[in-house]
Image (cartoon, rainbow, N blue to C red):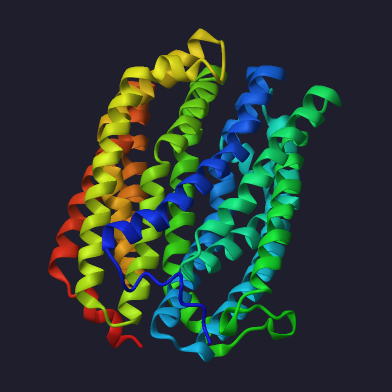
Amino acid sequence: MQDTKNRLTEGPIGQQMIRFAMPIFLGNLFQQLYNTADTLIVGNLLGSQALAAVSSSGSLIFLLIGLFNGIGSGAGVVIARYFGAQDEERLSKSIHTTLAIAIVSALLMTAGGVLLSPQILVWMDTPAEVLPDAVSYLQVYFAGALGMVMYSSCMGIMQALGDSKHPLYYLIFSSILNVALDIIFIAAFRGGVGSAALATVLSQLISVILCMRRLMRQKGAARVRLRKLGFDREMTALILRYGLPSGLQNSVIAIANVVVQSHINAFGEMAMAGSGAYTRVEGFAFLPVTSFTMALTTFVSQNLGAEEYERAKKGARYGMLCSMGIAELIGVLMFVFSPVILRAFTDEAVAIDYGVQKARICALFYCLLAYSHCASAVLRGAGHAMAPMAVMLAVWCVIRMAILWIFVPILQTIAIVNWVYPITWSISSAVLLIYYLSVDWVHGFQKKK
């Protein structure tokens, strides 16, 4: 029998969603420590050039992991669906197929990341003085892709089963380990930026070991058995049908972000450092919204699998309103306090000015970014992954890149690079709102069984 204590198909909606989202928020908080520890320690101990190398790597990292994380989100939708429907046979097959896909994905990512990183960084117009450190960081990072992909998959499986607490426990431990290893490798052993990537890789491998141990001790159909790992045809098709649109969306948006990063790079090392520091801060600031987004997908999937249609609709509205309100509050705080916050990452006045300029342009539009993410999460949870993919590709990629290519050469100011975000957030929110209100996303999920 399945362990039903983590079901989201009964009980007060607000209480259930907040209780499920809170461990995700704390987990995401510690996940950010993986990246922020690199940034803080590298920036303060190795200097702005090393900080620029780490910062410029973020877009490329997301480019290569976006496809596989998107497939993982599709797996979460399938697993939550069968968990809600109490279909034990398909639940077991979906979990073991998800892990098999993760292993193969990690091997492909390692090969692609290690081999292609140097050339892609050159295409991004990474300054020559930054390039060696950026290549070193990325190649070490992608050499450990197995830990990164497997942890993401294990976490997604547990969350799809309604368990958001154990991923948090494991991540807290590995995050503390990551910070300790950063300090040891860089401060004590005098390592370069590659040491920061190595600390992250080792910490993620520890997370995988802890997660797999938990999954192999689950009750009933959710229990992982190594001998069952493999590709079930039906489950592989479903996971790819729901996951590939999200993965392609992530990857193509990442390509657009690489284009954005190349425009930032053109303004020099200080612009790279300041914008990179802002991006780290924004990652923390947006964690509550990200948590509700992840909770929404699981909540909607489980309830539609259990045919609790009205409950799914009420949960979607609740999650969207909470996310938008929290996002705007955070945006106001970011607008006011960004000069103080950014000083934690660098003491270079010019770099801080670049980061503050970006914060003052983007922060007050966080509510629109929140809506776009939440509407996409609800639609993916309902099995409508193609719609958010089409919107995001058209708006966050085509329109965003068109604005940059047309206006940056004419105006020659980094403000255009910063304004491209709120402009495209506004457009995507409007289009997704129209789609959300016009389609029967609730019963459409049931028809796709």
Q: Residue 155 falls in which quadrant of the image?
A: bottom right
Q: Is residue 385 visible?
A: no
* Nearer to us in this view, 312 or 102: 312
* Nearer to us in this view, 73 or 49: 73
Q: Residue furthest right?
A: 189
Is residue 36 found left or right of 118 in the rendered image? left
Q: Residue 300 falls in which quadrant of the image?
A: bottom left
Residue pictured at 29% horizontal, 47% vertical: 323
Q: Up-down: is 275 above or below 388?
A: above
Check the picture and name the quadrant holding the C terminus. Answer: bottom left
Q: Up-down: is 397 above or below 314?
A: above
Q: Position of residue 49 (x, y in %)?
A: 65, 20
Q: Residue furthest top?
A: 349
Residue pictured at 21% horizontal, 68% vertical: 313
Q: Is residue 187 visible?
A: yes
Q: Position of residue 164 (x, y in %)?
A: 50, 59
Q: Position of residue 111 (x, y in %)?
A: 73, 58
Q: Up-down: is 337 above or below 95?
A: above
Q: Position of residue 374 (x, y in %)?
A: 30, 55
Is residue 224 found left or right of 185 in the rendered image? left
Q: Residue 33 falls in which quadrant of the image?
A: top right
| Number of residue marks | 0
Is residue 50 found left or right of 244 in the rendered image? right
